[in-house]
Amino acid sequence: MRKNERQDNEIRPVSIERGFLPHADGSLLIKMGDTHVVCAASVEESVPRFLMDSDQGWITAEYGMLPWSTNTRSRREAAQGRSGRTYEVQRLIGRSLRMMVDLNSLGSRTIRIDCDVIRADGGTRTAAITGAALVVRDVINGLHDAGKLTELPGINPMAAISAGIVDGQPLLDLDYAEDSGAEVDANFVMCKDGRFVEVQSTAEGKPFSRQDFDRLSDLAFLGITQLLALWEEPY
């Protein structure tokens, strides 16, 4: 039996608290079990140098884990520099968020999302993407309401979740104990219409079969479908 008597195809309890950081241009706290991530947006009326004079907007992300987000204190990355893992995760978040909307519809502005893990129990990157996508939606709606976007662009709802094989059994939404002992670990980012944005899957110890991957993909589809219900809540 899994922690909290979860079924193999069951996600952890999930909740969001919008407006968690009132001074940000948009924010929320997302909780998925014991993984808690603060996602906050800044709207900048400029774009990176490589997009100058293009009339195209940009969406990017930064990611970090607080020193006591895990059971041992880690050094602040402000003091030691960002790790390779941090760069990899925040690039994943940014790539995913840019799939949500036609960047040309944003005008020459940047939406920057900060994802800060305040409590970690596995699945921090997928929780960050799920929460950040909601914040991007809220910010775009806010820009339109403020008259900064003449038309409301189409927004592609998305969410992300992990799945893996532990002791030969496919499981959905791994916590840290499950993830650290998994034979296969995968992260899925998916749109509401069922299309994938990104899939990261890794074998530990020995390769896994196409059948195993399909089983994990089916679990991820089930979990992300449940997470997309968060988009129906008022913002």
Image (tube, rainbow, N blue to C red):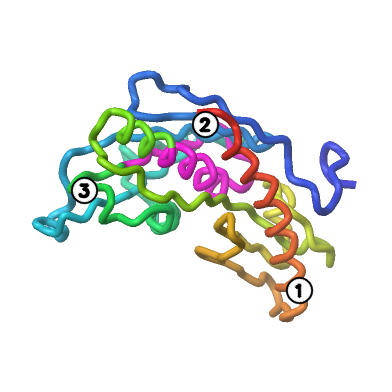
The alpha-carbon separation of the residues under discs 1 and 2 comes to 33 Å
Please indicate whether residue 144 sits to the left or right of residue 167 in the image: left
In terms of sequence position, does the residue under pointer 1 or pointer 2 come before the other? 2
* Mark number, residue 23: none
- Is 58 located above or below residue 119 in the figure? below
Q: Residue furthest right?
A: 1
The residue identified by callout 2 is: 118
Mark 3–mark 1 CB contact (< 8 Å): no
Under mark 1, the amino acid is: Asp
The residue identified by callout 3 is: 107
Using the image as rendered, state which of residue 114 and residue 218 is in the foreground: 218
- Name the spot of residue 150 as percent of width and height, x first: 25, 40
- Is 15 located above or below residue 22 in the figure? below
The alpha-carbon separation of the residues under discs 2 and 3 comes to 33 Å
Under mark 2, the amino acid is: Ile
The residue identified by callout 1 is: 212
Please indicate whether residue 109 sits to the left or right of residue 61 in the image: left
Res 201 → quadrant: bottom right
Q: Nearer the viewer, mark 2 or mark 3?
A: 3
Residue 130 included in the magenta stretch of the image: yes
Instruction: Please tell me whether mark 1 sits on a helix, a strand or a loop.
Output: helix
Instruction: Please tell me whether mark 3 sits on a helix, a strand or a loop.
Output: loop
Crowding around mark 1 (Cα neighbors within 10 Å: few <14, some 14 to 19, many 20+) is: some
In terms of sequence position, does the residue under pointer 2 or pointer 3 come before the other? 3
Crowding around mark 2 (Cα neighbors within 10 Å: few <14, some 14 to 19, many 20+) is: some
